[in-house]
Amino acid sequence: MSSTVPSSICRVVGLTSDVGKKRNGSAARANLAAATGERHPVCVHGFLGPMSIKVTNIEVFPDVSRTFSVGIRRETILDKEFNAALVSR
């Protein structure tokens, strides 16, 4: 999935085929806007290529990303920004 495509971080759950069972519990990125019927393109981490997965087999994590800034209050040093996702279990 291209970095320009809006995607949601999710987990794959409830797949019953032999191939799908290997992907259950895996983190993934789903393009929820590009559905074909009841299926969505999903890139599962650790596996090559996107899969077409039913929405009932996608557990979407809430978007909890934030932008943090650091700096030491000197004009000669640029602030650095980064994104982080906080996930509680």
Image (cartoon, helix red, strand yellow):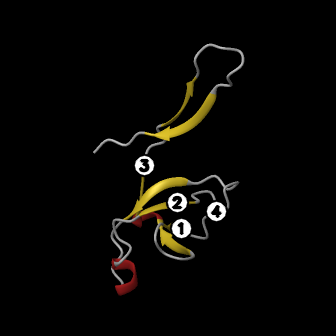
Q: Secondary structure at mark 2?
A: strand
Q: Residue at x 35, y 86 (%)?
A: 18
Residue 29 is tagged as 2
The extreme bottom residue here reads: 18
The extreme front residue here reads: 76
Quick one: 8 or 46, which is closer to the camera? 46
Badge 1 crowding class, 10 Å Cα cut-off, few under 14, some 14 to 19, many 20 or more, is many
Q: Amino acid at mark 1?
A: Cys
Of mark 3 and mark 4, the one earlier in the sequence is 4
Q: Disc 2 versus disc 3: distance between alpha carbons?
A: 10 Å
Rendering coords of residue 40 (x, y %): 55, 67
Quick one: 10 or 84, which is closer to the camera? 84
Rendering coords of residue 56 (x, y %): 41, 64
Quick one: 73 or 59, which is closer to the camera? 73
Q: Residue at x 60, y 65 (%)?
A: 35
Q: Disc 3 versus disc 1: distance between alpha carbons?
A: 15 Å
Q: Amino acid at mark 2?
A: Arg
Q: Which residue is mark 4?
A: 34
Q: Residue at x 70, y 54 (%)?
A: 4
Q: Residue at x 49, y 41 (%)?
A: 63
Of mark 3 and mark 1, the one earlier in the sequence is 1
Q: Amino acid at mark 4?
A: Ala
Q: Disc 3 versus disc 4: distance between alpha carbons?
A: 18 Å
